[in-house]
């Protein structure tokens, strides 16, 4: 995951190896689905946590992350309640979405394909996520920080998210394809 020990300003981080933690205040997962076959609806999960354990090289790194399903928001209270219900995420029964990497392969200077197991509603499927390194820096408290962004597409039906409604004019209310973007800031305390 880590291809550089300097940020754009040139300040060095202490060490890339070790355990990096997701900073939930500066991280999130967003999604886009098509509504009524004509428009895009965007939403966000704000409860994200996890770690990246690395020896400083992509092949020697492992990512584990969890997302709290109850943190979903689409800026519409009624829709959010429906998404938290048994028709979709069933947050009481399945409070977490989980991702565990199985391989990380560089595809460029600061780009990777992260393959891993994504679990939603206790259904686990392999996924590939394109990831870009956004940079490294040291914060005012002496902690090393790293930023990454990723994107992937899933078919929600593969994870038991099958609720839908047929439209009179043809088609369905909610697309099966979901586009996901992940933005994380990691912290690494100096050793």
Image (cartoon, rainbow, N blue to C red):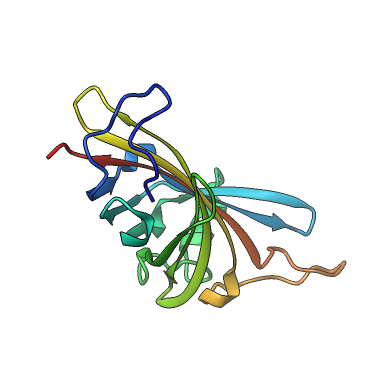
**Which residue extends farthest right?**
169
Q: Is residue 59 left or right of residue 113?
A: left
Question: Is 132 rendered above or below residue 117?
Answer: above
Residue at position x 27%, y 40% in the image: 187
At horizontal 44% and vertical 78% (from top left) the residue drawn is: 123
Whether residue 131 is visible here, answered yes or no, is yes
Q: Is residue 151 left or right of residue 65?
A: right
- Give the residue drawn at x 18%, y 38%: 189
The location of residue 83, given as percent across then percent down, is: 52, 60
Residue 180 against residue 156 in the figure, above or below: above
Question: Considering the image in quadrants, where does the C terminus appear?
Answer: top left
Give the residue drawn at x 21%, y 35%.
14
User: In this rendering, would 175 be left or right of 38?
Assistant: left
Viewer-side residue, 27 vs 107: 107
Q: Is residue 62 visible?
A: no
Q: How many numbered discs?
A: 0
Return the residue nearer the eye: 72 or 85.
Answer: 72
Q: Residue furthest left?
A: 191
Q: Quadrant of residue 130?
A: bottom right
Where's residue 112, x and y in %? Answer: 49, 54
Q: Above or below — where is 26 with respect to 74?
A: above
Image quadrant of residue 164? bottom right
Percent of width and height locating residue 102: 39, 69
Left or right of 98? Residue 190 is left
- In this rendering, the answer to whether 80 lies above or below 134 is below
> Residue 29's spot in the image, x, y percent?
47, 49
Residue nearer the viewer, 61 or 166: 61
């Amino acid at each position: 995951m880590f291809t550089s020990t300097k940020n754009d300003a040139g300040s060095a981080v202490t060490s890339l190896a070790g355990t990096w933690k997701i900073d939930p205040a500066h991280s999130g997962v967003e999604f886009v689905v098509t509504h009524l076959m004509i428009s895009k609806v965007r939403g966000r999960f704000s409860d994200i946590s996890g770690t990246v354990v690395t020896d400083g090289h992509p092949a020697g790194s492992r990512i584990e992350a969890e997302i709290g399903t109850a943190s979903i928001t689409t800026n519409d209270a009624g829709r959010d309640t429906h998404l938290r219900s048994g028709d979709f995420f069933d947050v009481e029964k399945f409070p977490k979405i989980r991702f565990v990497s199985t391989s990380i392969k560089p595809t460029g200077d600061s780009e990777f394909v992260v393959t891993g197991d994504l679990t939603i509603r206790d259904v686990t499927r392999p996924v590939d996520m394109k990831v870009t390194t956004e940079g490294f820096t040291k914060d005012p408290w002496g902690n090393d920080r790293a930023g990454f962004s990723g994107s992937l597409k899933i078919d929600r039906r593969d994870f038991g998210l099958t609720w839908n409604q047929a439209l009179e004019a043809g088609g369905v209310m909610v697309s099966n394809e979901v586009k996901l973007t992940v933005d994380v800031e990691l912290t690494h305390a100096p050793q």
